[in-house]
Image (tube, helix red, strand yellow):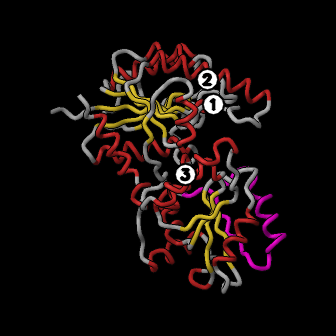
Amino acid sequence: MLKPKVVFLCGSLEQGCDGVGDYVRNIVGSLRTFGIEARAVSLMDKYCTNYNFSSTDLNQNQLFYRIPYNLSVSERVDVTKTLLQHLNPEWVSLQFVIYSFHPKGLPFFLPKLFKQIRLNYRWHIMFHETYIGFDRKADFKSKAIGSLQKTIINQTVKKIEPEILTVSHFLHKVLIERLGYKLNLIPLISNISYHTYSSDILKSELQKISKNFAFEEKKSVGIFGTIYPDANLVTAFESIFKDFPNERCFELVTFGNGGNYLDDKINALLSAYGERIEIIKLGKQSEEVIAMLLNYIDCAICSTTLQHISKSGVYAAYRLFDKKVYFANTYLIPEFHDLSILEIDKLKNYDREYFDSRYLAQYYKNFLLKS
């Protein structure tokens, strides 16, 4: 039996800068360990200005192909179509993020693009995002944009005619089912692969990055990734203080793309508890260093609202590395409150292996092997 081929399509594949791109990279790597020939194409990569391939002379060993953002729709169709024909997959998996195809989340060209590149491949769509303006408190503008996004999603699905639709976020499942589609709920995975390190290696390697690590002298709290505007680090740390009543001082290690709100949130935290907390800001790091930091920290703060942790690769990374997670935003949408509590409790009770990309790759392997 020939190995099935799958090509994943997403917005961007810039490592460490795009959560879904990291997700795709992990899935491609994990599938290949199962003998599945997997590759990925970024359709509108804002982090590159030139192709990283030649459409007339493809490197058969290349795994990731990047199409720059600044092309016309017709150019993008031609390049994508040619690339897929060269790669000749049995399956194409669209990793759908509506804002990765348009900065305002309104890529009206999307149905046309997929109609022209659909050809005879078998299709799967994974919804990482859906549409906005669905809750009662949404303002008129959000509801109007959401209505247009629903139309784009509907038309895209109809043009693609996928065999399988999936989500990892229970709320997204509800929202897409409102459009009349049936979906499978699949595992959430970490955007960082699991590795363990001895304490000696951690100390040796981390001291190369910063001389300020306390190691065993203080409890270390980690914040990985973007800090969102509604995150409250003060209340998160108050929960940590209660759980560690005998600890006077802590260190807070921030790493990854902190975003525009990181400094303001840290300043607010220091205003409240500056005498108890020392800050180590590391910024973007390699995946290997992030894995070391996830080994090193004692616990972690998640900036993603509690409502949406089932789509957060950062939350999954914390859980994969077996860290207790504190939440900086516990808001739940009122009309989904009971369902949210039920699903979040399920997520909190999963073993760490649930968040490993190999666990999800097994799911992909099963449908890729369908006759």
Asked whether, in this view, residue 79 is left or right of residue 47, the answer is left
- Which quarter of the rendered picture does the C terminus lie within? top left
Give the residue type at disc 1.
Tyr
Quarter of image, res 270: bottom right
Q: Residue at x 59, y 37 (%)?
A: 47
Q: Contact (CB < 8 A) between labels 2 and 1?
A: yes
Range covered by the magenta-colored residues: 257-285
* Disc 2 secondary structure class: helix
| CB contact under 8 Å: marks 2 and 3 | no
Residue lying furthest left: 1
**Where residue 352 sits: x, y (%)?**
43, 61
Give the quadrant of the N terminus: top left
Q: Amino acid at mark 2?
A: Lys
> Distance between the Cα atoms at labels 2 and 3?
26 Å
Q: Nearer the viewer, residue 352 or 317?
A: 352
Please, what secondary structure does the residue beneath circle 1 have? loop
Residue at 73 percent across and 75 percent down: it is 277
Report which residue position mark 3 lands on: 342
Q: Which residue is mark 1?
A: 131
Identified by mark 3, the residue type is Leu
Q: Residue at x 33, y 26 (%)?
A: 87
Q: Of tags 2 and 3, which is closer to the observer?
A: 3
As measured in the structure, the alpha-carbon distance from the residue carrying label 2 to the one carrying label 1 is: 6 Å
First in residue order: circle 3 vs circle 1: 1
Circle 2 residue: 150
Residue shown at 54%/16% (left/top)?
155
